[in-house]
Image (cartoon, rainbow, N blue to C red):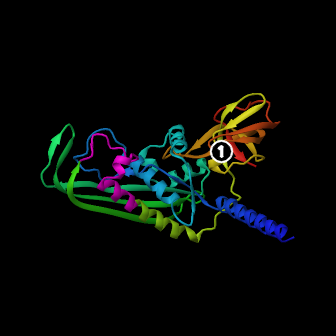
Amino acid sequence: MYKRRLLLVLSLLVGLLLFSSVSGQENLYRVAVLPFDDGSIDDHWWGDYDIGSGVADVLVTSMLNLEPKKFRLIERDQINRVLEEQDFGATDRVNARSAAAIGKILGVQFIVIGKVTEFSNKTTGGSLSLGGKGLGLKTTTSRVVMDARMVRTDTAEIVAAVGGKGEKKQSNISIEYDWHHLDLNSEEFRATNLGIALREAAEQVAKQFGEKVLAFTPTASSKITGSVAYASDSRVILNIGANDGVKVGMVFNVLHIIEEVRDPETDEVIDEISEVVAEIKVTEVKEKSATCSIQKKLSKEFPIAVRDKAVQK
């Protein structure tokens, strides 16, 4: 009898933990971080690099690492695909209204836009250069400063405007990083003074966003949206999956976009004319995709096609 009761109590505890984990995941704020504007890159930088996207990636990691967890982030590949499809340039991305429009397409509650205002790596002291690298006694002072704004996608309201600053100064004998190839996601870069300063600035921004966003209640019932990546007579595969909150059994409407409505002054996409062409149900979920069966075909004029929009019912 005692063992039976103990097993029952343990089962209840496991169930509560699982329920808490799932509920917490559903109630996280859904956020997309757009590539930052490269605002103040020093003249001495050279080579092939993308500071704005690299800074955004570091900020995504910092937001994911907050404890307790508050955010669920959209992957960069999905963001880049939308930016390319909608033809949003760098100027559009830093505009709150345009950013909100991008966020609606991505199906997020908030979108983060920002600017790197300082990204400097200044060294004093002697060093011997050899093939892009050097060895010598030096003092390095690295600084990263960024400004970031969080925008509500439903109203285009800026709900938080914050800043982050990181600085690292070090005097030692060390091997220099090869700045010809500035990969902000590499382990080698993260170990540099500049990498440490960047993480410090990003963590400050993430912490402030985590505090500011508490004024808003996450809407777990908000509809998940995606696009059709594959379509046949009996099966549809969406470009969203477990990472986006999709679960087996969910039902989506498939919408064919007939025409985009653009602002006559800015040429920004402000609305769209669409028609529901089918109802589909999720039968299998992977990290980045969801396979669906076709429940109903609702249009004789438009078949289900790649790039059609899928909206949770």
Q: In this view, does 21 lie to the left or right of 155?
A: right
Residue 6 lies, with reference to residue 284, above or below; the image says: below
The x and y percentages for residue 13 are 74, 67
When asked about the image quadrant of residue 142, the answer is bottom left
Report the front residue among 14 and 7. 7
Residue name at image x 54 percent, y 66 percent:
67
The x and y percentages for residue 219 are 67, 62
Q: Circle 1 sits in a helix, a strand or a loop, which is it?
A: loop
Residue name at image x 29 percent, y 50 percent:
41
Furthest-top residue in this view: 233
Q: In this view, does 265 lie to the left or right of 214?
A: left
The x and y percentages for residue 11 are 78, 64
Mark 1: few/some/many CA within 10 Å (<14, 14-19, 20+): many
What residue range appears in magenta?
A: 176-201
Report the front residue among 304 and 139. 139
Quarter that holds the N terminus: bottom right
Furthest-left residue in this view: 126
Q: Residue 197 in magenta? A: yes
Furthest-right residue in this view: 1
Specify the amino acid type for callout 1: Gly
What residue is disc 1 on? 241
Residue name at image x 31 percent, y 54 percent:
194
